[in-house]
Image: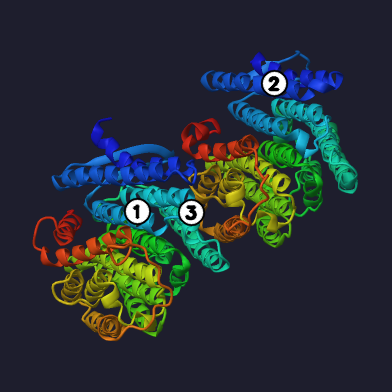
Amino acid sequence: MDWNSWLPLWIVLSSLLPGLLIFTLAEDRYVLRTSLNMGGVLLKLGLVGWMWQGVKAGQDYYFELPFLPGAPLVLHGDALSMQFVLLSSVLWCVTTLYAIGYLEGSPLRSRFFGYFNLCVSATVGLALSGNLVSFVLFYELLTLATFPLVVHRGTAAALKAGRRYLAYTLTGGTVLLFGAALLHSLIGSPVFMPGGYLQPLLAEHSGVLTLAFVLLIAGLGVKAALLPLHGWLPEAMVAPAPVSALLHAVAVVKAGAFGIVRVVYDVFGVEVMQQLDLGWLLVVLASSTILYGSWRALQQQDLKRRLAYSTVSQVSYVTLGVAMLGPVAAIGGLVHLVHQGVMKITLFFCAGNFAETLGIHKIQELNGVGRRMPLSSTAFTLGAAGMIGLPATAGMLSKWYLATGALEAGYPWVLLVLLGSSAMNAMYFLPLLYRIWFLPAAPWPQERVLSNRFETHWMLLLPPVLTAALVLLMGLLAGTDISPLSWSKLIVEREFSYD
Amino acid sequence: MSLVLVALALPLLAAVLALCWRRQAAWLVWLAALLNLPLLAVALWQVVTSGSQPLLLSSTETGLLNWQLTPLTALLMLLVASIHFLVASYSLSQWRFAGLSLYFWPLAALVQSLFFVLLLSADLLFWYLSMELLGLVAVALVLLAGKKAWQAALRYLLLSLAGSLCFLLGVALLYTQYGSFALSELTLGIAESSGDPRLALWLMTLGLMLKAALWPLHWWLPAAHLVAPAAVSALHAGLIIKAPLFLLWMLWSQLATPAIAEVGSVWFLLTGSLALLAGGWSALRAPLPKLMIAHSTVAQLGYGLLALGLMLSLAEPALEQAFWLFIMAHALAKAAAFLAIGEMQLRLGGKRLTTFRGASQTMPLAMFALAVAGGSLIGLPPSGGFLAKWQLLVPLWQQSQYWPVLLVILLGTLLSAGYVFRLVVLAFYRARPRPAGFKAPVLPQWLALMPALLVWGLALFSLPLLHWLGG
């Protein structure tokens, strides 16, 4: 085996091995733990950058290990997996920095960072999975690695959220496993390919294929927080802020959405989806989730809960774009996978900063924060502007492609959904911005001095500033080679030209 | 081939020596268990490379003592020896504190020898004898817990004897009809002659189901596990109740004619489904962790029954693999679970579920062992339990008439996730500060973790494993 085939494995191991080492460290080994964390992060970024370069040039990265009869464990770097790998490793980098600052001095840090690393390894493995069985494996590992992070605080409320998280995700994982076994019993588990591999079964087994689709989407829908299966996400807000970032932007929710993309394009394929007439089902489900999530976000008075319902709504843009089965809509959905991640992580970092520095949890406590914490507030404003879809931000691009794609794919009513959701986005974000910048400050609930030079600890401040800059840059530089938009176009080009 | 006979004799010798030389009993038995590992690994390698081998001990015409070593039996022997070794190592590191009597050691060694006899022989007489003795040894092991165990042990003894009697009646009936104890001759006899083996087969099934604690004849098991010391529970759930299950599979797969197999299939599917659901539900409601794991055993054996029932009607090789994988994965997972729970109860002091509050901080390794073993019980990938479930699911999806079984497996999986995580979640409560002197020794925790790691290793080793199990 040459170096190229080992590269996907190394990308997974670059966070797995530091994670396992961190478990063994004593609490007070701050320097060693931080070096392991950051070393893993930088190594992974380097490896991913290398692979990105190669995939762009048409190189194939393929690693295989025997696992089940007829279904090896495959790690395969293609254009679609790079989208998710890049997103999660870049965001993981800033989240690690943030987490180190956030947890400074708190107990059980070795346990936290151990699972933190495992979580990202599972995410990257899931992104690189080359067949359905490998995907299921990493999907379950992700559940197991995230659970200890959700319950990290060990309070009764955290444990309650953790139980709920497990009840949802383990059920989802089991249903997904059943779906994967059903497809395996029909045709085995070949490597994901553009256009899917179920075409030969269409004539005889259309009913069974529909059943398999329902099982797979139900299993993935739990993590993607599709409508009746979203209940765990707002509850998981009790977790520490870096974990929320992980759940909402880097790993868990994205794993569900990414899985839906894989199933629609690379397992079933556009043609089979059209012939089985399954697309509209997903479009309706995603649309109702978008509207419902925005509606519930409007009613929340807790900042993190409002952001959580906003995630429920925004992640379904990805599903929506993919389910419409047209190339333009697909660009919108795929690019939103990245855009939503960067915007939402910015918002959660800022919410964490407000809570850590000033003790702000409720929306009415935000009054006048802009003058006390100008940088965090600016970052928050940029993230919110992107979510609403204001021009020159990343969010506008996603909505633009989704809207034109909806017209092209023959779903004109989806425009109304997008409009309605954007209006509600504005309704739940603009009052926050008004409070932050224009209302006079009241005494803060619980102020802590974390830094003498900056508005808060620099490790908490740098990550949101960086990601907010990214929100702006992704919008401004959309036309260039390195933007997520161009990469999404590349993916769509490869996914839709398989004949 | 003579290697396995040495492996059989070694623990027997150790048991006798341990009785004469009581002060060194622990070391002797542990050493015998250690020596058996390389012996059996080589035996497995031999039988895999050169095929099944007959072990002719004498050339009598009755076919007694015509023992045979197949890849399957070699693999199971290695499994028995591994679990035995791990449990022995744990007990050795721990027995002064766990209040384990010195008699544990010869009894544990006898379990291994008797199990080997049962696996190697292929005739009903030896099966009856070894199973009967194994039952008596098991009762003696439960009795090691002292006075509080008397009632549970007495009940276990009576039921075990009743089970053996049923089995013996079946053996006698078959002998009078076909004039042989050897399985191969009986198979021929049943295929050719017009005699009716039904009564005999069902009597033996009844006896075996009683001894293996298969639903609905399982009620003695939770009480026995509750009182027994951790190492005994681990040996019992991991190995001893697997012996009758092995026999059940051999009898039905060899002796059942198609007409009988049809009825048997329905019976095993029914009892297996109910075991999975009723056992899972009881485990979910159990107030004590050991009780929970015992009910989980009842539930998990349901998977074995399902595989047996399906095999009788589908004759798919994947189902046979699934059956043996369930047995192996369950044996390892239960050994780890009982050792981890025993260790935590010993150190944290307490038998209730609340003992485990904060255990992920006070005893992280033992808790991790329990969680990892639980993952295999649920069937999370990549564990042995997952592999077994996968081998069961794939053939099932191809037969659409069995959809209720799929539903049962789904529910059973969710129930098992429910009871495993009920315990695991407790461990993540922020721990109350322990007294300053509290320090949990690490070695026993690692030893409890070993079988759990092995069961996850099964999945990484799946292709040769499936090959040896007859793929």
Q: Would you name the residue on which mark 2 appears?
A: B31
- Tell me which amino acid carries mark 2: Leu
User: Viewed as shown, does residue B132 lie left or right of A72?
Assistant: right
Residue drawn at x 36%, y 84% is A442
Q: Position of residue A79 (x, y in %)?
A: 21, 51
Q: Would you name the residue on which mark 3 appears?
A: A144
Residue drawn at x 48%, y 53% is A144
Q: Are marks 2 and 1 in contact (CB under 8 Å)?
A: no
Which of the two residues, A356 or A451, is positioned nearer the viewer here? A451
- Tell me which amino acid carries mark 3: Leu
Q: Position of residue A64 (x, y in %)?
A: 34, 38
SS state under label 1: helix
Q: Residues within 10 Å of mark 1 (few under 14, many from 20)?
A: many
Which of the two residues, B414 or B226, is positioned nearer the viewer here? B226
Which of the two residues, A490 or A312, is positioned nearer the viewer here? A312
Instruction: Name the disc covering residue A96, or none.
Output: 1
Which of the two residues, B135 or B362, is positioned nearer the viewer here? B362
According to the image, what is the colour scheme of the structure? rainbow
